Image: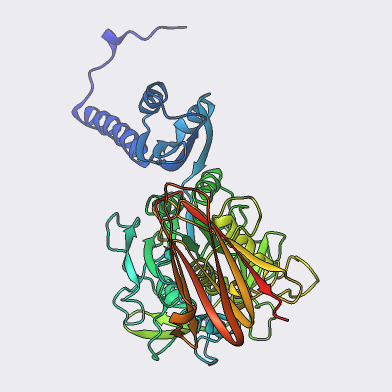
């Protein structure tokens, strides 16, 4: 083969050089364009342990940029070049790599049919609970959604603040096209002011946690951040009207963390019309709520699945929207806040150790809501209605039934919680209450008849907190009348008192 002798090659003409330069420049442009168009992926990287310096150096080497470190789960959000994903997934310190995928609000349908305002509130028994009066006062509810129109007259007094993870600021105003978050907020806690609508818990404290933008879209990392915020800010309940079909280990870990740290998680089960329950409602740590109509039939949007736990009104729910307006929306997004509001009423009314595990916490709240639900459909739990329709009137009614010998509960002061209180109803009889005190300084017993305090039937017990236990006995005469009795414990964190009430035979 003849070798090419460059020395014998004819010199390039001006035009040939120009063409060569253009070719080289084009190649360079292609390279630059290729680099510019190389896709970076936003992913959630979970680590078996914490992110150490070695793992962090490896990320830098693979041109990954850390966007966020979660506080309570071993995971981060990072921008990663696609070509580096395989190497990062192969890192032995990595537990999982998930796309920071988009999430959205659970779709709803706008209605033209008119129902009585707030039919769902009375349908679950909340109206009768308000008369006790129990209205959710002081209970903190985080609404993980599109934000809240905190200027709406129905919501302004109950709005207590929040955070915006969409625009990374502290102004979680609802900018959604259908006022989704504001509609949810109104179902939970619209004011009792004889105007417009009333919420299930009209005196609850609302906190807007904006994890969805104006179109109803968000990301997995925004949801995780919202759950962490709920724990860090001592929320009692988190309402999540968000749904997606893609499983996420990171989101499940965040839900588990929030639940184990005392937050009751309530989520829309999804508007899949007979399809599967969506996440996060499908997680074991979350109450999955389906929606029903006024005749206690499943809404046309309702899902089916073993994860369904409770049912609540979800068809044609009238509630608050932006700019001081109202509208009808339907869906499990409207059902879930009925359960969140009911939980707030039960929490204010007073928790007992309903599940008998010797600890009073959000597990007792969940247990009581389930145990007192009105069974619908097939007897027992089923895939259509779960345990049944939420019945808050039954949940807070601790009047002894004919087969009950006594009422027993514990007043316990929790860390960073208000003074414990328990509300019961006594009627048509004489009752003896035995208070066994363990370090509380005071136990106040307030008796009300028709909303007015009966000073002759009320008591105030002062205890020496250096001696424990101590006992006090009082007799409450509710012959031919109905009394609302409130027991209030005053003392330092960790102090408690057991109260046992029994009917007295007055032959």
Q: From the viewer's side, name the closer residue of 134 and 44.
A: 134
Is residue 214 shown to the viewer in this render? Answer: no
Question: Which of the pair 427/339 is nearer the observer?
Answer: 427
Q: Nearer the viewer, residue 266 or 178?
A: 266
Look at the image and name its color scheme.
rainbow
Residue at 38 percent of width and 71 percent of height: 176
Q: Residue furthest front?
A: 507
Q: Residue at image x 53%, y 26%?
A: 90
Find residue 125 and report its horizontal and vertical position in percent.
59, 81
Q: Is residue 258 above or below residue 113?
A: above
Quadrant of the rendered image containing residue 20? top left
Q: Is residue 32 above or below residue 453?
A: above
Q: Can you tell which quarter of the image residue 299 is in?
A: bottom right
Q: In this view of the protein, can residue 202 be seen by the observer?
A: yes
Would residue 262 be found to the left or right of residue 16 on screen? right
User: x and y percent of residue 229 in the render?
Assistant: 39, 52
List x then y, in percent, for residue 5: 33, 8
Direction left: furthest residue:
14
- Compared to residue 450, the image places residue 223 above or below, namely above
Residue name at image x 30 percent, y 57 percent: 167
User: Image point 52% across, 66% down: which residue?
Assistant: 350
| Quarter of the image with the C terminus in it | bottom right
- 418, 368: nearer the viewer: 418
Count of number-bearing discs = 0
x and y percentages locating residue 84 in the rendered image? 45, 31
């Amino acid at each position: 083969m003849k070798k090419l002798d460059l020395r014998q090659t004819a010199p390039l003409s001006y035009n040939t050089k120009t063409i060569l330069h253009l070719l080289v420049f084009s190649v360079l442009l292609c390279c630059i364009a290729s680099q510019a168009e190389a896709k970076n992926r936003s992913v959630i990287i979970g680590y078996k342990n914490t992110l150490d310096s070695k793992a962090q150096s490896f990320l830098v080497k693979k041109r990954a940029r850390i966007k966020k470190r979660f506080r309570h789960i071993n995971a981060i959000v990072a921008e990663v070049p696609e070509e580096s994903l395989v190497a990062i997934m192969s890192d032995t310190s990595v537990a999982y790599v998930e796309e920071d995928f988009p999430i959205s609000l659970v779709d709803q349908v706008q209605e033209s049919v008119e129902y009585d305002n707030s039919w769902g509130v009375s349908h679950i028994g909340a109206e009768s609970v308000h008369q006790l009066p129990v209205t959710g006062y002081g209970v903190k509810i985080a609404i993980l959604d599109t934000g809240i129109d905190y200027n709406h007259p129905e919501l302004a007094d109950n709005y207590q603040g929040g955070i915006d993870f969409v625009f990374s600021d502290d102004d979680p105003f609802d900018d959604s096209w259908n006022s989704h978050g504001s509609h949810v907020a109104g179902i939970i806690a619209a004011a009792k002011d004889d105007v417009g609508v009333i919420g299930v818990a009209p005196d609850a404290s609302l906190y807007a946690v904006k994890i969805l933008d104006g179109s109803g879209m968000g990301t997995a990392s925004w949801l995780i951040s919202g759950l962490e915020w709920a724990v860090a800010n001592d929320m009692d309940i988190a309402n999540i009207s968000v749904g997606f079909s893609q499983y996420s280990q990171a989101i499940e870990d965040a839900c588990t963390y929030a639940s184990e740290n005392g937050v009751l998680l309530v989520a829309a089960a999804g508007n899949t019309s007979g399809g599967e329950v969506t996440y996060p409602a499908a997680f074991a740590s979350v109450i999955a709520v389906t929606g029903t109509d006024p005749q206690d039939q499943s809404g046309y949007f309702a899902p089916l699945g073993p994860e369904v736990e409770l049912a609540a009104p979800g068809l044609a729910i009238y509630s608050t929207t932006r700019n001081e307006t109202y509208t009808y929306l339907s869906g499990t997004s409207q059902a879930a806040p009925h359960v969140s509001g009911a939980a707030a009423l039960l929490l204010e009314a007073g928790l007992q150790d309903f599940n008998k595990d010797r600890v009073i916490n959000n597990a007792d709240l969940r247990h009581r809501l389930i145990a007192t639900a009105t069974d619908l459909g097939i007897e027992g739990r089923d895939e259509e209605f779960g345990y049944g329709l939420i019945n808050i009137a039954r949940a807070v009614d601790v009047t002894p039934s004919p087969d009950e010998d006594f009422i027993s509960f514990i007043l316990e002061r929790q860390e960073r919680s208000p003074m414990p209180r328990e509300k019961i109803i006594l009627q048509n009889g004489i009752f003896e209450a035995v208070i066994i005190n363990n370090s509380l300084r005071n136990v106040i017993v307030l008796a009300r008849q028709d909303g007015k305090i009966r000073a002759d039937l009320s008591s105030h017990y002062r205890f020496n907190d250096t001696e424990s236990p101590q006992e006090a006995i009082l007799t409450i005469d509710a012959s031919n009348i109905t009394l609302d009795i409130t027991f209030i414990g005053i003392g330092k964190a960790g102090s408690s008192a057991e109260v046992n009430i029994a009917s007295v035979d007055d032959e």
